[in-house]
Image: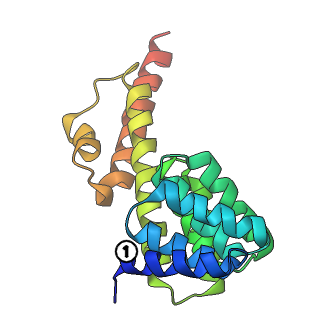
Amino acid sequence: MRKFDEAIACYDKALELSPGDPVIWRRKGFALLKLGRYDEAAASFDQALAIDPVNATAWQRKGYALACLGEHEDAVACCDTALTLDPRHILAWQSRGWLLGVMCRYDEAVDCYEAVLAIDPDRRSAAWHRERVRERRDLEALAAEIREAERFIEVPACIREVVTERDYGNVGLARAVLRELVGRAEAVAVHRS
C-alpha cells in the first residue's frame, strides 16, 4: 500500500520482539530506501548483514543506499559482494552497471548489463541501459578526440555540436569525419616537411 512510515513503525515493533531476525531488518531497510532515508537504510542493512552476512539481496540494497549517499566505491564493493554470493543476482548486476556508468567506467558498466542479459535475455531495462551507457561512452570519446584534434585543425562547429547537443545518433559519423580531417592535416604537414 506504499505506507512506508507505517511499515517502519511495524518493523520497529517486530524488532522489539525479535531483534535477531535479519528479514525484518532487511524489510525495514527497504522501506527506509523507499522514503529516501538512505543513512538509516544502510544502517538497517548493516544490522541484517551482521546476523546473516551471506544474504546477497541485503548487500545489493546496502549498495543502493550507499550509492544514493554518493559513496560509489563502497556501493560497488557491496554489489561485488552480492555477486560473489549469488552470481545470478540481476539487481546486483544492474545496480553495479548503473554505478559504474555514473562513475564513467563505461566499458565495465556495459559488461554488467551484458551479464544481466545473459541471465535474462528479455530484460528490456538492461538492454536500454546498456545502449545509453554505450552512447555516453562514445560521446565522451568524441569529446576527447575533439580536444586532441584541436592541436592540428580547426574543428568544425557541426562536429562540436554533436557533443554539445548530445546528438548520439551522429557520434560515429562525427568521429569518422574528425579522423579524416586530422589525417589530411597530418598528411599535409608530413608532405611539407
The image quarter in which residue 66 lies: bottom right
* Residue at the image position 43 percent from the left and 81 percent from the top: 7
x, y percent for residue 2: 34, 83
Q: How is the image coloured?
A: rainbow
Please determine whether, in this image, residue 20 is positioned above or below residue 178. Answer: below
Q: Residue at x 53, y 74 (%)?
A: 12
The answer to which of 79 and 1 lies nearer the viewer is 1
One can see residue 110 in this view = no
Image coordinates of residue 135 in percent, x first then y, are 41, 58
| Residue 160 image position (x, y, % from top left) | 26, 37
Relative to residue 121, is residue 95 depicted above or below? Answer: above
Q: Residue furthest front?
A: 17
Q: Residue 155's quadrant in the figure?
A: top left
Instruction: Tell which of 62 and 160 is nearer to you.
Output: 62
When the figure is inspected, residue 70 is found, relative to residue 48, above or below; the finding is: above
138 vs 66, left or right, is left
Q: Determine which residue is flagged by label 1.
A: 5
Q: Quadrant of residue 116?
A: bottom right
Is label 1 in a helix, a strand or a loop? helix
